[in-house]
Image (cartoon, grey):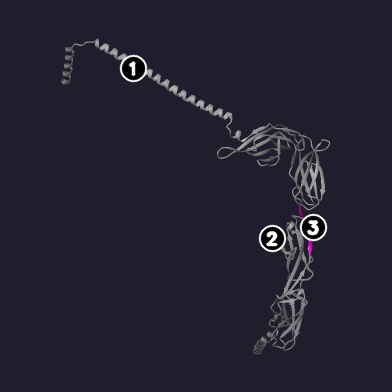
Amino acid sequence: MSSHLFVIILGLCFCPEESSQLSLEHPVFSGPSEALAKQAVDFQCEIPNPKNQSILLQIFKRGEHNNLLGEYTLLKGEEVAVIPKVIKPNHEGYLECVARVQNNSEIIPTVSNTYFLKVIEPVKGAAIVVSGQTELYEEHKLELQCKLQKGSHVTYKWLLNNQPIFPSPYHVFAENRLVISRVTSMDNGSYVCNATNIFNNTEVFISESPEVVIKIKDLVSTPDISFTVLKDHNQNYFATVTCQSTRGTLPISFSLYNNTELVSNLTTEEKQASFKVPVVMNHLVQLQCQANNGDKTAYSHWLPLEVVPVAAPVLITYKYDMAENYAVIGLRLYCKAAKGSHPQFQWYHNNMPLNDRGSYYYVYNQLPKESILLLSVGRSSAGKYHCEVSDSFDNTTSINSTRRYFDEEVLNRLPDIVVAVVFGCFAVLNLLVFFCCLMGVMFRQRKYKEKSLLNLEMEMVAAENELDLSGYSEDPDVVETAKEDEFDQVRSG
């Protein structure tokens, strides 16, 4: 019993010493936070070594212990190891130092703290790579990538025609890419990429790419369509139809359609094209222009083409302007033909043609509806006016309006019909007054006659009554007796 107790106590005494020999303290690891690629740097790994053991210190990236970056063996009495290393770009990451006792696998290795090493590889060989064609149309997407032969921790700056490009809803920067979701003509030009990185906030490395020219083609705009009717030497009528776009990269292909039927097409180095179309009088057709310069097709509105010759009658109507004193100071003459799709108008004053404007007139055409002649009423504008209408495509036949005479005195004189109406109304009013007075007199006479007859009848009745009373006599005694009887009856009552 006592022998077993001695063995147990002896084991307890030696247990702490064996336990300390089977473990190491954690090493302290340090080094630069930034390093240039291909540059040699020193890492320091420190661990207490009270037992003067031979300790192996190794540097790894965290989680990659199969890839040794450097090592150093502490000899007896050493506690600090300086491990030099030529840095490569793939050395960037979290590093740690592992300590283990050599020739003693029973002692468990320990791991140091980790720290992050940033590796700067100077930029080199910047070049722009275009995703797609260098020539594209408006509203398409453009994507440029700035690729480097070498470089890490890089910032990019894009230039267009030596001017910096800033972010916008259509210009997006993503790492080394520039994406323009909807290009316009403003994005046309020479692109350059500047790649930059900085070491330790002191050394700056820049690589500028060669220029890449991007050509943005303008989409063809909606074409305008118009026509002019003419007559050839064979007396046949035709229309020259013009299709014109205000913008668009050349060449442009124009096509003319009559409803769904293709009339003709033409590719030109200009922004317009003309087509000759035969014309049938009083026949309506619908024309449309289409324009294309390699991308989207643009369509004009439908234009009705109908040629109707001018026809009589040609009428002149007018309106006048008055001053505050009601004097006529201006005239507006309107000339209009009964028919005609392409009329041309000519005004005449005393058989002299009036063109555009003069000292007292101004011609304003509202084609094809009418022509308006504005006149200032005065001595110089007095005279006869008429209008002549002809077809713009054939002036061999013209139609004249009737002549109208205007002068200041006539315009400011009351018309005869107005005078007649005024005097007529005055006469009617006088007749009404006379009739009312006459009726009043007649009414009064009638009333007087009726009153006279009534008075006569009343006098006759009174006279008859007097005659009746005079023929009737009454005994005074009888009357007196009757009055006394009536008095006695009253008293007895």
Element type where label 2 sits in the image: loop
**Is residue 215 part of the magenta span, yes or no?**
yes
Magenta span contains residue 389:
no
Secondary structure that dominates the magenta span: strand
Q: Point out which mark residue 455 bears.
A: 1
Q: Amino acid at mark 2?
A: Ser
Which residue is denoted by mark 2 in the rendering?
168
Q: Is residue 130 visible?
A: no
Mark 3 residue type: Glu
Q: Is residue 316 left or right of residue 478?
A: right
Query: Mark 3 highlights which residue?
Result: 135
- Quadrant of the snapshot with the N terminus: bottom right
Between marks 1 and 3 in the image, the one whose residue lies nearer the viewer: 1
Q: Residue at x 51, y 26 (%)?
A: 427
Q: Badges 2 and 3: C-beta atoms under 8 Å apart?
A: no
Where 195 sits versus 221, above or below? below
Q: Foreground residue, 363 or 106? A: 363
For label 2, count other residues whose C-alpha is less than 10 Å away and answer few (under 14), some (14-19) or many (20+): few
Residue drawn at 47 percent across, 25 percent down: 433
* Residue range of the region highlighted in magenta in the rendering: 211-219
Q: Give the Cα separation between the discs numbered 2 and 1.
A: 115 Å
Image marks 2 and 1: residues in contact by CB distance under 8 Å: no
Judge the density around disc 3: few (<14), some (14-19), many (≥20) Cα neighbours within 10 Å: few
With respect to residue 193, does 45 lie above or below? Answer: below
The earlier-in-sequence mark between 2 and 1 is 2
The residues bearing labels 2 and 3 have C-alpha atoms spaced at a distance of 22 Å
| In-front residue for pair 183/437 | 437
**Rendering coords of residue 350 (x, y %):** 69, 34
Hey, which residue is sitting farthest top in the picture? 471
For the question of whether residue 490 can be seen, the reply is: yes
How many angstroms separate mark 1 from mark 3 (CA)? 125 Å
Location of residue 384 (image quadrant): top right
